[in-house]
Amino acid sequence: MEAFAVPGLPEFETGDDIATAIEAACDLRGDDVICVASTIVSKVEGRTATLADYPAGPRAREIAARFEEQTGEERDPRFAQAVLEESTDLVMDEPFLLTETRFGHVGVNAGIDRSNTGGAELLLLPKRPSESARRIRERLSVDASVVVTDTSGRPFRHGQTGVAIGWAGMPASRDWRGETDRDGHELEVTVESVVDELAATANLVSGEGDDGTPAVVVRDWTFGDHEGSENLYRGVEGDFVRQALREWHYEQ
C-alpha cells in the first residue's frame, strides 16, 4: 500500500471543484482511495460563519459562565451557541463541550474549527459529509473511492488522529465475523473500521499546521472479499460510555 499527499493544491474557496483540482495535480487510478480533509469540503460548501451569526441564548451564556468559573478562561457565549446549534445531543457540557453532530459524529465543540478557516471566524463541519464525498466522487473521471476526514481526540488516549466523517464508493467497515483466525477459531466480534484506518493513514502523510496538505491518495489497498457495513456511529442504545456520561458530573 502507498499513500501520498496530492501536491500543489490551491487555497479552496466557496464553489471550487475539489475533484477537478485533485485530478489536475496527480494521475488517479480507479482503485485509489482519495482522503479529503473536511476543512476544504467545508470551504467549498460555504460552511463558514461569524460569531455574530449566533446570538447567545440562556443555555450558551450559562455554559460560558461556568467554563470561566472552572478554568479562569473566558469563553465567548456565542461560540457555545454555535456548538449547540450544530449539535443534536450535548453529551458533556463541562469541562468542555462534547456533542453529537447532526450526521452522527461525536466530538468536541461539534467539530467547529477556528484554525485553517480561510479568514473566517468559524469553520463548521460539512452538513452531510457522505453526500459531500459522493459529489466529489461523481466529478472524478475514474472510479475511485472518497473519504472525508477530520481529526479527533479519543477517550482514554492522549493526542488526536484522523477519522472518517463521510465516505463514498466503499463500505465504512469490513466484517470478519464468521471467518477464522490463524488458529482456526471463528471470529465473533471483529468488525474493522476501514474508513477510519484510511483516514488515520492520510493524517500521517498530510501533516498538520501550515505544512498540512488537504488531500491524500491511498493506492494499492483493497477491501478484500469480506462483507461490508455502512455502520460507523454507535447508536445511543448500544453506546455504554455515552450512557454513563449522562450520569457523570464534573468536579474540580
Image (cartoon, rainbow, N blue to C red):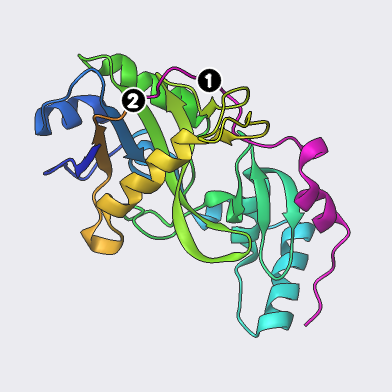
Task: Find residue 144 and report its horizontal and vertical position in percent.
Answer: 28, 20
The residue located at (24%, 62%) in the rendering is 210
Residue 197, can we see it? yes
CB atoms of marks 1 and 2 within 8 Å = no
Q: Quadrant of the C terminus?
A: bottom right
> Magenta residues, as a range?
223-252
Image-quadrant location for residue 6 = top left
Nearest the camera: 12 or 236? 236
Mark 1: give few (<14), some (14-19) or many (20+) Cα within 10 Å: some
Nearest the camera: 182 or 136? 182
Residue farthest toward the front in the current orientation of the protein: 183
* Residue 173 vertical placement versus 140 (above, below): below
Q: How many marks?
A: 2
Q: Secondary structure at mark 2?
A: loop
Q: Taking 222 as reference, is 251 left or right?
A: right
The residue located at (21%, 60%) in the rendering is 211
Task: Find residue 151 and report its horizontal and vertical position in percent.
Answer: 45, 52
Task: Find residue 89 and report its horizontal and vertical position in percent.
Answer: 74, 45
Residue 29 forms part of the magenta stretch:
no
Residue 229 forms part of the magenta stretch:
yes
Q: Quadrant of the N terminus?
A: top left
Residue 17, can we see it? no
Q: Secondary structure at mark 1?
A: strand
The residue located at (40%, 35%) in the rendering is 148
Which label number is shown at residue 222? 2
Q: Taking 89 as reference, is 39 left or right?
A: left
- For disc 1, the marked residue is 228
Residue farthest toward the right in the current orientation of the protein: 247
* Disc 2 residue type (three-letter): Thr
Q: Earlier in the sequence, mark 1 or mark 2?
A: 2
* Residue 129 vertical placement versus 149 (above, below): above
Q: Taking 83 as reference, is 124 left or right?
A: left
